[in-house]
Amino acid sequence: MDDSEPIRILIADDNAEFRSGLRGLLAAQKDLLIVGEAATGADALAQAASVLPDVVLMDLQMPDLNGIDATRRLVTTSPHIGVLVVTMFEEDESVFAAMRAGARGYLLKGARKAETLRAIRAVAGGEAIFSPAIARRLMTYFGRAQSAPAAILPELSAREREVLTLIAQGQANEAIAVHLALSLKTVRNHVSNIYAKLQVADRAQAVLRAREAGLGSDGH
């Protein structure tokens, strides 16, 4: 975008009072230009195609078409338009739904004026931006995700991992059957499935794969 041209903004929100407040804030900024207002998701899409904004300030809860679906359609048809969600909803489900739909930013209504202006300019410049409250939620979410242990050999079922662990500990099929209270035939079937899923030829190779994955050592 040419830095000499103002950032063209479309406001999409069904709350007339909120639109008026945004209009007052943005009108005082020389580098920002409001080119349209929409009260429904469907109207937002129609106006976006007509006025060609650089940024759409998108509410999530609107008549006809909600902000998530409107964002998804807008990003699909006009990927050059940046969508900044401005909403009251801060739960993880709404945040991640907006991100999956293609929104570049997520701002809570009630954000400080400077924060709102910074977010608009950042989205117009191609950045992804989130309000501090949302950023904290994202950090907490991803922190939990990273601390959760990754599934070991996910191609195996829980029972097959149990069997493989005992194999890696050096137990024969008969001992495994007793340990897990299974029939010998069932254990042999599990072993065959393990070989097939891990693409190994024999017990030694299965033990090697198990050890590489951390199974069977230290009694685990």
Image (spheres, rainbow, N blue to C red):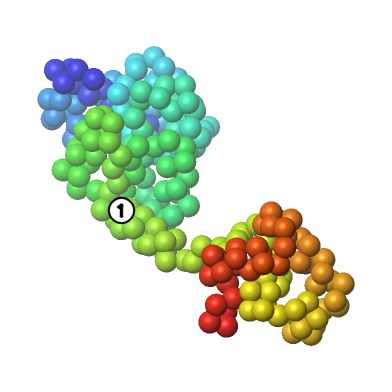
Which residue is at 20% across, 44% downward?
115
Q: Nearer the viewer, residue 210 or 79?
A: 210
Which residue is at 64% across, 74% downward?
168
Q: Residues within 10 Å of mark 1 (few under 14, many from 20)?
A: some
User: Looking at numbered disc 1 in the image, what kind of residue is underneath it?
Assistant: Ala
The x, y position of residue 14, in whole percent, is: 40, 36
The x, y position of residue 181, in whole percent, is: 80, 83
Residue 84 left/right relative to 121: right
Q: Nearer the viewer, residue 48 or 2?
A: 2
Quadrant (top left/top right/bottom left/bottom right) for the C terminus: bottom right
Q: How many marks?
A: 1
Q: Nearer the viewer, residue 152 or 135?
A: 152
Q: Is residue 109 above or below residue 23?
A: below
The x, y position of residue 197, in whole percent, is: 70, 56
Corner quadrant of residue 189: bottom right
The x, y position of residue 175, in whole percent, is: 76, 83
Residue 58 left/right relative to 219: left
Residue 99 left/right relative to 211: left
Which SS class for mark 1? helix
Q: Is residue 93 above or below residue 181?
A: above
Q: Is residue 156 visible?
A: yes
Corner quadrant of residue 40: top left
Q: Nearer the viewer, residue 102 or 67?
A: 102
Which residue is at 42% across, 66% downward?
147
Q: Is residue 37 visible?
A: no
Q: Residue furthest top?
A: 50
Corner quadrant of residue 44: top left
Q: Which residue is mark 1?
A: 135
Q: Is residue 178 above or below residue 6?
A: below
Residue 17 left/right relative to 3: right
Which residue is at 35% across, 37% downward?
104
